[in-house]
Image (tube, coloured by chain):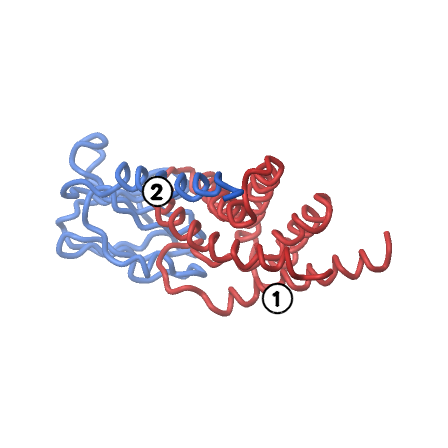
Amino acid sequence: MKHRCDLLVILLPLLAAGLLFLLLRPSGAGQYVLVTVDGAEVGRYPLHEDRTVTIGEADYNILEIRDGSAAVTDANCGDHTCVRTGQIRRAGETIICLPHRLVVKIIGGGEGTVDAVSGGGIA
Amino acid sequence: MSARTVARFALLTALAMVLSWVEVLLPLPTIIPGVKLGLTNLVVLFALYRLETRSAWCLSILRVLLVAFTFGNAFSLWYSLAGAILSLLVMMALKATGKFSVTGVSVAGAVCHNLGQILVAMAVLRSAAVAYYYPALLLSGTVAGICVGLAGAVLVRRIPL
């Protein structure tokens, strides 16, 4: 075969995908729901307390925490990728809303400081 | 610049726009943003192999701008632009080595397009959280790159333009 390097360019992304998948896979039970907008933390809520939070005002995402899992149930972003992501519950799982620069991430108990845990800070 | 060159360039630009539109009309049922077939890369591949490098660049940047202004938005422009530039840079480099087929070049282009988009998303979100999507994008990009590359190879060989 003339182009034997083709295999490399096909195997390398697959290998990288496998490696990244192992590195980033959800690990263990989640404890908190960490909400960041523009990279800054705007809220942190216990995963095991049911609540509904509206993040943002003009650009809003509605975050529902229920029965130990979190989901964005409504938003006025254009693509609704965040809503279609569905429920997340394990540490490392993430919901992203690119138009609103929002990241909702489940974290375990070990991350972050304990006194930041009381949450709040959302209008 | 001959009329023939101008006509050929305009034709390919129009084709790239139409293919982008087709992809907007037929979104793949997936929850990962950025997963797509990359039909437009057919045109960029063709330009890369059959026109001058300069034309391939003009074509790729122009169709990104046109597509963003007609059926995209201010956000999609930056993602597409980063993807298109990184993708074309890598495709040019691989093509220049002479060790890759059109299909190989296409796969690298697809994967790098996704990488460019992820990098912009990281900058926009100021968070590495979107890396979470990249394994799935690598898989879909590789498969899409192979499909588009196989078709592209036929076009590069057969189309008299």
Q: Give the chain ID for the blue colour.
A: A
Residue drawn at the location 15% of the way across and 54% of the way down:
A50
| Whole-number angstrom distance, CA of label 1 to CA of label 2 | 31 Å
Query: Depth check: B18 or A63 in front?
Result: B18
Q: Nearer the viewer, residue A120 or B143?
A: B143
Identity of the residue furthest to the front in this view: A1
Q: Answer left or right for B110 relative to A31.
A: right
Give residue A17's mark.
Answer: 2
Q: Residue B13: x percent and y percent?
A: 69, 59
Question: Which callout, 1 or 2, points to the residue nearer the camera?
Answer: 2
Left or right: A118, with A17 as reference point: left
Q: Residue furthest top?
A: A113
Instruction: Name the residue carrying label 1.
Output: B18
Q: Amino acid at mark 2?
A: Ala
Task: Give the quarter of the image for residue B94.
Answer: top right
Snapshot quadrant of residue B121: top left
Which type of secondary structure does the marked residue at label 1 adopt? helix
Residue B120 at least partly seen: no
Q: Amino acid at mark 1?
A: Val
At 40% from the left edge and 39% from the top edge, which residue is drawn?
Answer: A12
